């Protein structure tokens, strides 16, 4: 019978200075967490923030207005768009 893998079996190993370790231990204790759960929570929060920061586009107020105005514009399609639509219809048989 094969053993069921532990979903929390992945590891991160790293070294840090005694001062940093003591600071982390103090912080974990102050919020009533183990060092491991405190470190995991802090790393996950920092990871999510880093990813959000890199995947979110922030526009100035001016650029936001321009973008929204373009979305509301019901202008006519240009020739390239008409050609692409025709090609799509031909390929799909419609």
Image (cartoon, grey):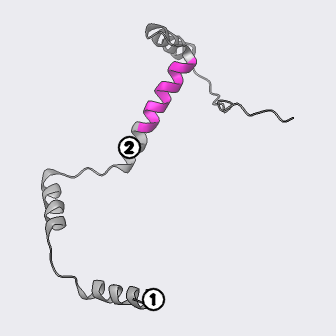
92 versus 57 height, above or below = below
- Please name whichever residue, 53 or 7, is drawn nearer the observer in this view of the structure: 7
Residue 53 numbered tag: none
Query: Which image quarter: residue 7?
Result: top right
Query: Which image quarter: residue 84?
Result: bottom left
- The residue at the far right in this view is 1
Kindly report which numbered mark, 2 or 1, lies closer to the viewer in this rendering. 1
**Residue 31, image x, y percentages:** 44, 11
Which quarter of the rendered picture does the C terminus lie within? bottom left
Pointer 1 local density, CA inside 10 Å: few below 14, some 14–19, many at least 20: few
Query: Which image quarter: residue 63?
Result: bottom left
Q: Which residue is mark 1?
A: 91
Residue 52 numbered tag: 2
Q: Secondary structure at mark 1?
A: helix
Q: Secondary structure at mark 2?
A: helix
**Residue 51, image x, y percentages:** 42, 43
**Magenta region's main secondary structure?**
helix
Tell me the magenta residue range: 36-48
Which residue does the image show at 41% across and 40% down from the upper left? 50
């Amino acid at each position: 019978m094969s053993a069921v893998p532990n979903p929390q079996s992945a590891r991160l190993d790293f070294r840090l200075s005694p001062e940093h370790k003591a600071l982390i231990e103090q912080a974990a204790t102050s919020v009533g967490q183990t060092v491991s759960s405190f470190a995991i929570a802090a790393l996950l929060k920092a990871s999510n923030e880093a990813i959000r920061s890199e995947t979110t586009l922030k526009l100035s107020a001016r650029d936001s207005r321009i973008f929204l105005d373009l979305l509301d514009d019901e202008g006519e399609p240009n020739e390239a768009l008409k050609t692409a639509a025709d090609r799509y219809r031909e390929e799909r048989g419609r």
